[in-house]
Image (cartoon, rainbow, N blue to C red):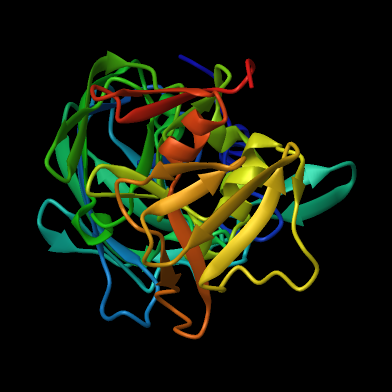
Amino acid sequence: MRTVFIITCLLLIFGAFALADDGAIGSVGGNLTPMDSHPSIRMVREDVHIRTFRLNATRPYELETYCRFVFRNEGGPCTVKMGFPEDIDGNSNGFSYFHSKVDGKRVDIRKVAPVYKKGDTEVSIPRGWRVKDVYFKSNQTRIIEDVYRGRLGGSSAGDVSLKYVLTTGRSWRGPIGEAVITVDTTALKDYQTMDAMPAGFEKRGNILTWRFRNYEPQKEIGVSFWPGYSRFTINGKKGKASASFMAVEEEKMPYLESGLVMVSPEFMSRVLQWNSEWPKGTSQDSRHLSFKVNGKVIQLAAGDRKAVVDGKTIVLPRAPYLRASKYWAAKKALVVPIVPILRAFGATVTFDPKTSTTHINTEST
């Protein structure tokens, strides 16, 4: 028997999902855990399907999750208090609904905020758990079903994310027999960058699938999406590691359009850490831009495929244009296919079709 107390589980969850100050955790779901460690109940199987959706363009992204757990009692008769983790820090509204069945019959759920001792003081953890009591006969197998809806997390940088807690399952007897977790990302298909963890998932179309067998969960399921294209390496380092990839207006983000990386020159200058000089009064929504990068003058114009770099004319594969924000039509930025300009500066640019990654090397420029 492993000694795993509920506060251990709570602290693991709390630590795993701390985001930036301007982030919102959203509605965190997870597999059932006994509110005390249990010597005889084993989780035989866990099936989870998460569907993302959006009711309309002005509403936040949401998720609806169906969970089916198979438990077997390998000991004597007992009643188990089962908990399902909700959101963690109180920054969101939690689940908009949560329903549960035991062997096909609807059961009552109570919402509790467990407490733990900090010195002599009891401290409650916000929102906490949806809890039910389940009775097991000796050697009985029972099926638990949970269905809930909530919001995805996100931040002011435009990214959205979802989480599903696996590690709470460690408090059942022995390893979890088998688990299949699927995430339907169809609602977010227009987001150009997706990162998912842990590794080893299968992707078919917009469906991600994780499969585990006889496992002790060590990591949570996490999927994040970003509207722009961030599959860059810059001098061998991942571009998205730079804060510049996230803290940017939506109309200035890099996008893949018909195989071309389109981006605002001002944004790319920041990411590449170029020594750029912008004339006083320069506006990124101007149809004509003239600025200096590392002492070289670049001239661009909307609708004109010819660009001038350090006095030399190059022909772009697509004319620059003013891209409007999807959310604020009045906000615009001139965007340009950036690869020819990088190469005009002497940078080496290659594209890996297997990973959809653009590799940029500017160290020789």
In this image, 313 relative to 207: left or right? right
In front here: 85 or 92?
92
The single residue placed furthest to the right in the displayed view is: 120
In front here: 156 or 230?
230
- Quarter containing the C terminus: top right
**Residue drawn where x is 63% and y is 15% of the image:** 364
Q: Quadrant of residue 149?
A: bottom left
Residue 26 visible (yes or no) = no
Residue 61 visible (yes or no) = yes
Expressed as whole percent of the image width and height from the top left, the position of residue 200 reads 28, 20
Expressed as whole percent of the image width and height from the top left, the position of residue 23 reads 61, 58
In this image, 200 relative to 300: left or right? left
In front here: 193 or 103?
193
Q: Quadrant of residue 95?
A: bottom left
**Residue drawn where x is 60% and y is 58% of the image:** 248
Q: Is residue 339 above or below residue 266?
A: above
Expressed as whole percent of the image width and height from the top left, the position of residue 186 reads 19, 56
Q: How many marks?
A: 0
**Residue drawn where x is 27% and y is 72% of the image:** 54
